[in-house]
Amino acid sequence: MRRLSILLLLAALAPLHAAEGGIVSFHLKSDPLATLRGYLEGWTPEGFTYRALGPTRRTRRVAWKDLVEEDATRLRIEVGLERTREQKLGLIPGHRLHFRGGTHQDGLLLEIDAQGRHLLKVQGMVLPYPKDRIDEVEDIAVKETEVYSREEIYVRALEQGTPRSAAEHLVLADHLFDRGALLEARDHYKQALGLDPQLKDELRNRLAEIRELAANEEVRALIAETRYLSSIRHKDGEALGKLREFASAHPEFERLVERELGRVRKRAYRRKRTEFIYRKHDRLHREIERYLRRKPTLAEARQWAVTELPEILKERLKRDMRLEDEEFEGLLEYRGHGALHWAGYWTGSFILSKRASIGKKTKSRVAGDPEGWWDKYSQISTQRNWLKAYVAERLPEFFDVVSVQFRPCKRCGGDGIRDVGSLTSVGGKHSWKETCPQCFGAARERIVGFR
C-alpha cells in the first residue's frame, strides 16, 4: 500500500518537474487514455528514448509516429526537431510603442529610465523615446531582424545551441562566409548538405569558391581581414586599399582580388543605401520640427512643404553624406525601401475636404475652419504629424505612399454628425443634429504609411 502511494505521488508531481528534471508525459495512439511518464534520455528524427518512472526504471524507445499528434508536435518542438509557427516566421516577443498622432514603432522595450524615456531596441540600436511622446505600449510578436543586428542574431543562434536543421546551418554559414571565416563556413555548408542533399546544386559554386580562397593561407588571411574591415562603417576605403596593394604584389591572384573588390564595393553601397534611407526620414522629422518652431500659419506650412522643403532635404542629405548629384539621384531611386513610417492627419483630416479624407477626388470647398484647427492644436507633435503626412503624399520624388488607412472620428463615432439635443414645446418634441465640431463632417481620420 505504501509503495502504491509513493507511485501515485510521483505521478502527480511529474508534470510539475517536467521542464527542470527532464520528465515527459505523453499518450500513444494505441491507448490515448493512458498517460505515460518518464525521464527523457535522448531523441532522433525517428523517435526518442525515456526511462519509465517506478521501481523498474526500464528504458524504452517510442517512435514519434506512435504518439498522438498533439503530444508528438509538442515534444518535437521542446527538443528542437520542430519549430513553432512563430519560430518559422522568425518572430520573438516584442513591443509596439504607439505615439500620439497615430504613428508607432516596433522593437523590444528594454527599460524605462529615470527620466521616463522608453529605451527601445531596433535593429541593434537602442533608441530613447521621451514619455510625453508615448500614448500606449503594446505587447506583440516582432521579427527578430527588427530587434537585433545581423551580428547579434548570429550570436543568439550560437547561444541557443548547435543548429539542428539545414536552414540554421545555412544562416550561420552565410554569416561566417561574409565575415571571411571561410573554413568555419565550409563546415556549416557541409553539415547543411548532409541534412538536405537537395542543396547540392545551390551550394556547389559557394563550396568551390571557398576551396579557391582557402587554398592559400595568405589569401585566406587577406579575405578575413578585408571582409571584417568592410563590415565596419567608414572602413571600406581601408579594405579596398589592402586588396589593391595585395593585387599589385601578387598579380597571379588578380582575378580573385577583382572579385573581392566588387564584393566590398557592393557591400559599401548597400550600407550607404541603408544609411541614406534612415537619414532621409530623420532629416524630414528634424526639418519639419525646426520649421514649426517659427509658429507658421497652416497656409504658410503647406506652401513651405512643397516649395522649400524638397530643396532643403536634397542639399542637407548631400552634405550629411558627402554625396555628388549623380550619386544622390541613384540612392533616391530606393525611396520605396526600408521600414514603413506612419503619420496621421488626425482630427485635421477635414482640411483635405470630406472627399479627400476618405480617399476620393477632392473638391475645392472645405467645411470647418482649417486655420482655427491649426491654432487650436498648436502642439508641435500634432502639427508635425499632420505636415509629415501632407509631405509624404505630395513629394513622390522622395517618398512612396504604401498604405492609407482610416479610422472613425472619436467624437462622432464615424457619422460626421452628432445629436445636439431636444426641445419640448407646445407643438411637440423637437431634436436636431449638427456637423461634428471635431472632424467637420469628414467622419474619418486619414493615416498614411510611407517609405
Image: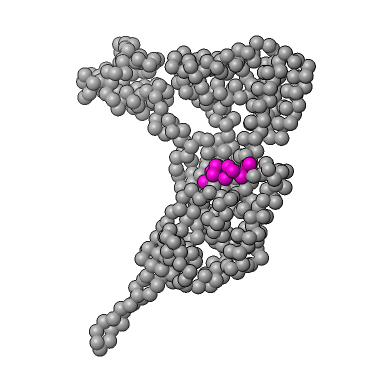
| Magenta part, dominant SS | loop
Question: Which of the 4 image quarters holds residue 87?
Answer: top left
Q: Position of residue 268 (x, y in %)?
A: 66, 33
In this picture, is 15 found above or below 413?
A: above
Name the residue located 70 percent from the left edge and 28 percent from the top edge.
229
Q: Is residue 227 left or right of residue 189?
A: right
Q: Position of residue 162 (x, y in %)?
A: 50, 20
Name the residue located 42 percent from the left edge and 60 percent from the top edge.
360
Q: Is residue 382 left or right of residue 358?
A: right
Q: Position of residue 363 (x, y in %)?
A: 45, 67
The answer to whether residue 69 is visible is yes
Give the magenta part as a residue range. 330-340
Name the residue located 74 percent from the left edge and 19 percent from the top edge.
247
Question: Which of the 4 image quarters holds residue 326?
Answer: top right
In this picture, is 309 found above or below 268?
A: below
Name the residue located 71 percent from the left edge and 35 percent from the top edge.
234
Q: Position of residue 186 (x, y in %)?
A: 57, 15
Q: Nearer the viewer, residue 258 or 322?
A: 258
Q: Nearer the viewer, residue 250 or 8?
A: 250
In this picture, is 446 found above or below 215?
A: below
Q: Residue furthest front?
A: 326
Q: Residue furthest bottom?
A: 426
Q: Quadrant of the N terminus?
A: top left
Q: Is residue 306 magenta?
A: no
Q: Is residue 7 left or right of residue 402?
A: left
The answer to whether residue 21 is visible is no
Question: Which of the 4 image quarters holds residue 111?
Answer: top right
Q: Nearer the viewer, residue 12 or 225?
A: 225
Q: Nearer the viewer, residue 27 or 218?
A: 218
Numbered disc total:
0
